[in-house]
DNA sequence: CCTAGTTATAACTACAATGGTTACAACGGT
DNA sequence: ACCGTTGTAACCATTGTAGTTATAACTAGG
């Protein structure tokens, strides 16, 4: 199956670096720590900026957090870089046959279950903050 | 982002039909209820068979459940049709720079968090059985 | 035995997301 | 003005998805 993009883990990595040493955090520096191309990092930074998590300084370089690390959760980061339509993790096949009892009800029945499953996962992500992770990067 | 494949919802749909009327359940019949191509259904049936959930009768047609509907959970179905390496929903960028404290620890730190998030989602899926869904397809 | 209906599977397609890359414009401090 | 940086656009190879066509193999009924 297609797994959730590494953009998420790269974004967490990026924000952690910014939290620790905002001065040094040029796109190139972050890219060399993440081990990817600077443009990939710049794109991720763009998403984090759009989500109101960071302030990036064009020209001069570097970035800084716009929120207290203890107020940035993994869910915030996940949502910033993983944009799906309607924020739905699961997809349901559309246009089932309404002449069939199962086809008529499958979407409504499944939607409730899958939304629940997604919600518990997101609540778990929301329980961990960037501030909790940073001490672990000694 | 790439969402979880509709194979999952199609598989639930398929198993529901089999549970309700195993006689009629040829690939073509299921495909017309799901509203897709019969070959797509046959591929899904192959995965469900490999997972030990159904018995398919080649030649004659039709299929039957190999387990009590109350013992088939959404997680069983999810696992049957969504095969990822190592069963990991999340991916973490690999080969970060070990010369950097964040790069050195990011994988271990994040892996624990993401595994947790995945686990609570899967536990939620495991709480719902096919048997619980079927009465809702009136 | 043969045919009709079915399952199993390979091969192919179109499409989209991913992660990376090159190139270049715009910015801003020295 | 220069230099390093950010911001984007354009492109590419790879991969997963969902569907499609075609063909082989299977089974029951006539």
Image (cartoon, coloured by chain):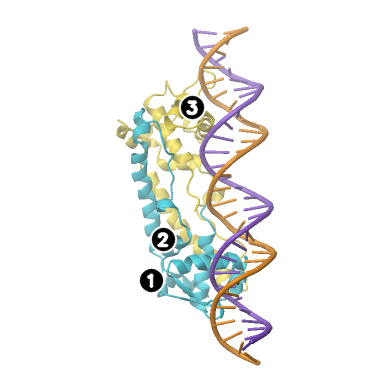
Chain colours: A yellow, B cyan, C purple, D orange
Categorize mark 3 by other alpha carbons within 10 Å: few (<14), some (14-19), many (20+).
Answer: some
Give yes or no for contact between labels 3 and 2 (Cβ–Cβ under 8 Å).
no
- The secondary element bearing badge 1 is classed as helix
Task: Judge whether residue B1 can be spotted in this image.
Answer: no
Above or below, B51 relative to C3: above
N-terminal of the pair, mark 2 or mark 1, is 1
Alpha carbon separation for disc pair 3 and 2: 39 Å
- The reply to whether label 3 and label 2 mark residues of one chain is no
Give yes or no for contact between labels 2 and 1 (Cβ–Cβ under 8 Å).
no
Alpha carbon separation for disc pair 2 and 1: 13 Å
- Residue B98: percent from the left, percent from the top? 36, 31
Task: Judge whether residue A7 can be spotted in this image.
Answer: yes
Alpha carbon separation for disc pair 1 and 3: 51 Å
Which residue is identified by label 3? A55
Categorize mark 1 by other alpha carbons within 10 Å: few (<14), some (14-19), many (20+).
Answer: few
Which residue is identified by label 1? B71
Which residue is identified by label 2? B125
| A81 lies left or right of B34 | left
């Amino acid at each position: 199956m297609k797994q959730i993009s590494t953009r998420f883990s790269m974004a967490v990595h990026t924000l952690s670096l910014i939290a620790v040493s905002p001065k040094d955090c040029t796109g190139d520096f972050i890219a060399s720590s993440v081990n990817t191309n600077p443009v990939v990092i710049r794109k991720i930074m763009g998403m984090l900026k759009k989500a109101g998590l960071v302030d990036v300084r064009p020209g001069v370089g570097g970035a800084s957090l716009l929120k207290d690390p203890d107020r940035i959760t993994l869910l915030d980061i996940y949502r910033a870089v993983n944009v799906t339509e309607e924020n739905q993790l699961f997809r349901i096949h559309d246009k089932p046959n309404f002449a069939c009892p199962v086809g008529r009800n499958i979407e409504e029945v499944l939607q409730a279950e899958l939304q629940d499953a997604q919600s518990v996962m997101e609540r778990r992500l929301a329980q961990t903050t960037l501030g909790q992770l940073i001490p672990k990067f000694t």
